[in-house]
Amino acid sequence: MTGRSGAEVMAALGDIAPDFARYIFEFGYGDIYSRPGLDLRTRLLATVAGLVCLGHAEKELEVHVGSALNVGASREEVVEAIMQMALYAGFPAALNGLFVAKRVFAARDAEAGLQEGLQAR
């Protein structure tokens, strides 16, 4: 769901708090994300909205915007979820979230272009 970013978190915390890294993945992804009742697309859009409302979780928002795309959310759905948060978290938080999404979309486009270039060879 998160791609390599999950492994990066585990590695980054490995020398200081390996148990904390394990808790993130066992609880968050093992217990919460695997619950019945919501599909992963819906869960990730809710997560994006929550992170926008926090207003101080830019790196996490970046990861979860990418994860939402990975599990089938469209770019339009991500943008709409972020814009909706202007009502609850304020325009600055929504604006910051939109800029994070824009970066994620641009990185994906650049990666897709690179892949197309490699395939054309």
Image (spheres, rainbow, N blue to C red):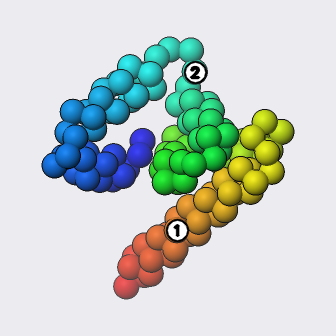
Q: Position of residue 41 (x, y in %)?
A: 58, 34
Q: Which of the image's four quarters has the C terminus?
A: bottom left
Give the number of callouts: 2
Q: Residue at x 72, y 46 (%)?
A: 82
Q: Position of residue 63 (x, y in %)?
A: 48, 50
**Between 110 and 63, which is closer to the camera in this rendering?**
63
Looking at this view, name the residue that lies furthest to the left.
15
Q: Is residue 75 left or right of residue 6?
A: right
Q: Position of residue 15 (x, y in %)?
A: 16, 49
Distance from label 1 to label 2 (Cα)? 28 Å
Q: Position of residue 86 (x, y in %)?
A: 80, 44
Q: Residue at x 63, y 57 (%)?
A: 101
**Does residue 76 appear anywhere in the picture?**
no
Q: Which of the image's four quarters has the N terminus?
A: top left
**Does residue 91 appear anywhere in the picture?**
yes
Give the residue type that dot 2 points to.
Answer: Leu
Residue to which mark 1 is pinned: 107
**Between 25 and 39, which is closer to the camera in this rendering?**
25
Residue to which mark 2 is pinned: 38
Above or below: residue 95 compared with residue 86: below
- The residue tagged with tag 2: helix, strand or loop? loop
Q: In the figure, residue 37 lies in which quadrant?
A: top right
**Between 29 and 108, which is closer to the camera in this rendering?**
29
Give the residue type that dot 1 points to.
Answer: Ala
Q: Residues within 10 Å of mark 2 (few under 14, many from 20)?
A: few
Q: Residue at x 31, y 48 (%)?
A: 9
Q: Residue at x 54, y 48 (%)?
A: 57
Looking at this view, name the residue that lies furthest to the bottom.
121
